[in-house]
Amino acid sequence: MSIAQQNRSCQRSQRWLALVAIVVLLIHTLLQPVSAAPPKAKVEILWDTWGVPHIFAEDAESALRAFGWAQMRSHGDLILRLYAQARGRGAEFYGEEYLAGDQATRLLGIPERGQEWYLAQPPAFRSKIDAFVVGMNKYAREHPDQLATGRALLPFTGADVLAHIARVMAIFVAASSECGAMLPNFKMDAQPGGHGWAVAPSHSASGHALLLASPSMPWGDAQTFYEAQIVAPGVDVYGAALVGFPTLSIAFNDSLGWTHTLNPIDVCDLYLLSPVAASLDAGYKFDGQIRAFATVTQTIKIAQPDGTLRVEPFVIRRAVQGPVIVQGGRALAMRMAGQEQLPVGGLAEQWWEMGKAHNLAEFQTALRHMQLPLFTVTYADRDGQILSLFAGNLPARARGDLSFWRLPAPGDSSTLVWTEAHGYDELPKAINPPAGWVQSAGGLPWFMTLPALDPADYPVYTAARIMTDARHFLREQAGIKLLLAHDKLSVDQILSATNSTRSEMADRLLETLIAAARRSSTPTTRRAAAVLARWDRQAEAESKGTALFALWYQHWVPLMSMRVTASNPMLTPIPALTSRALFYETLWDPADPLNTPTGFLIPSVAVKALETAALQLEQMGLPLDVAWGDVARFRRGQIDLPAAGGSGDLGIVRALDFAPGADGRLEAVGGPAYLALVEFADPVRAWVLTAYGNASQPDSPHNGDQLRLAAQKELRPAWRTRADILAHLEARTLP
């Protein structure tokens, strides 16, 4: 359905004495709940019929106070849990399953970091954080009956907000680096991905720059997006914040817009320590000396089923490099950018400044604050300028390439302990490239546009020089091909491209797989080949063959991983990052970057995986040609709809992650979360979607109400003018 049709069908950083005095005052402030004094400025929230708060305020503090109030109204229970986890007290309120996460949070020192970052805020922005907290506490005080477990956490403080930001950023860093294996409870329930595209006027059918924001995240927990509009003097910004954050992280205004994708930048390292003895109490070797670990013991409370609390000690050790983890008989120290080292306590303020910018120069001024620990930035504006930035606090390392740093580095020398990061000008970026477009889909930075960037222009540890993980790259290749399919891209063509469910992997491998399977002596395998021969190579709800191909892939990967790692022992520590690139007959070739890898390294393994997949479907009582939508579902509460989209591993642009439901069907648990398609015309036109709805409170009518649009691949108009909002008004509140 075209945008025009959708508009009709869904109308939606003195002196020392002064410094000491300030610090004393701030410490006193930190230890007290933020005052809930009556606001001085007028503010109102206009709620539209999709549960989106449009905040109109006379000053920024009032706007953010209302933003905090609105978030609690829509996601109060979730915020209580997330802030409990940021304090390292999740298990105290929510039970045993949160213990390991609390241990990781405390190991990284996140609760203390929240306090440090709050004290470090410039006064002008600290007042905004305070206002945000006032709003949250006000809602909780006025509506205690609307909140469930965790009310004893209240009132929130500004340190809670910053600790939450620190924890969420640590989760993102862990998900994109080898440090994730050391923090298993900082994992995401779904594979992050998504894509961001910016099209210059030269490549746009309308002559206006276009921006597509399609971050793919787990549909819940700390990665939940909250859609909102914030209007105050000097700012009118529309977009989405991560729940519990005080500023929008993906957004647009009348002049510009940006989005983020998670990028594979290496901002966390492990160091193999040399303990003096079996007991860590004896210390470790460092620069020819014996150092003692800095050790502290904390107490963690764990809620029990009978309502009591169990108390458990937790010992935290730190080496020069960072916190220490003992795993597999080895003592490893972790050094993570964006936390104690190269801190990003100003991230929320940077996003606020990005939202206030009017042009590329002002936007880059905000980016130069370097408070993004990672993420690719994709940008477009009404002047027709576009940008892609492979952002992050990339450590300035003394030596070693990416393969060196992906394994634990020697931890007995200070020469490998980094303390600084590369600056903005040293990061990969493309500004107004001749191709007329930039893109990011979670892959290598070299292909943010074409011609590709030269890796030799950047530090050797910036990112892999060649494609090492076929999962992200196949999907990225598919997206680039869609951008290249038209000389001029229209809004409707961008919408169609972002909703594409065609499998790039199928286009590379399917014919060879079918031919090999037809020669099989097993009737089941031959029947499976016949089904795949008729398949449309898409993951539409009505597609027949998608389930078989997706299941084939799930069996093919472990079978090939065993074969490849057996012949390449050095891959064993990181098979998920590297081995999949070696499954193919023709490996990825930088001379043909969009059409390789291709072919099967071992065709017989592929055929065996197909036989296993077919037998599994039959054992489940499903036909080999079961319609994808009969198996894959969009579900939320009472909503149960057929899904269109599939695993990004298959090279599908509209990537969805699934988990088995109670009835054996697959339920979407991750995928395009907040989408925005923006045309920088005059006036700006925009269409949006928050797939799972703009609320998670169980009794909210907006919990899941946009899933029907997601199932139909539709976006809704972004209502931004007061007149449009009033025409679609659901409620008006004065927080």
Image (cartoon, grey):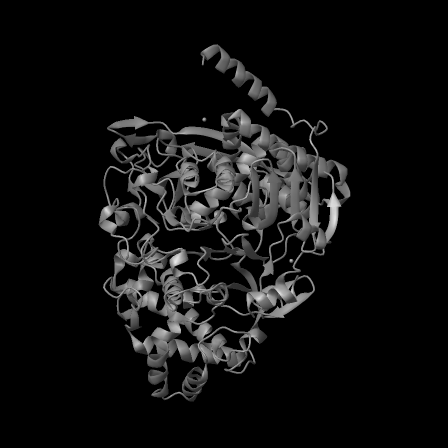
Check the image and report above or below for 21 versus 121.
Answer: above
Q: Quadrant of the C terminus?
A: top right
Residue 406 in picture, x, y percent from top left: 31, 48
Question: Is there any visible trace of residue 457 in the rendered image?
Answer: yes
**Closest to the observer: 310 or 522?**
522
**Closest to the observer: 345 or 44?**
44
Residue 723 in picture, x, y percent from top left: 68, 50
Left or right placement of residue 461 versus residue 303 in this view: left
Give the residue displayed 57% in from the left and 74% down from the top.
629
Left or right placement of residue 676 versus residue 204 in this view: right
Residue 665 in picture, x, y percent from top left: 58, 70
Left or right placement of residue 292 versus residue 724 in this view: left
**Closest to the observer: 8 or 365?**
8
**Closest to the observer: 177 or 413?**
177
User: What is the number of callouts on the image?
Assistant: 0
Left or right placement of residue 145 versus residue 480 in this view: right
Question: Is there any visible trace of residue 700 in the rendered image?
Answer: no
Check the image and report above or below for 212 versus 711.
Answer: above
Residue 413 in picture, x, y percent from top left: 26, 33
Q: Quadrant of the N terminus?
A: bottom right
Residue sitting farthest toward the top: 17
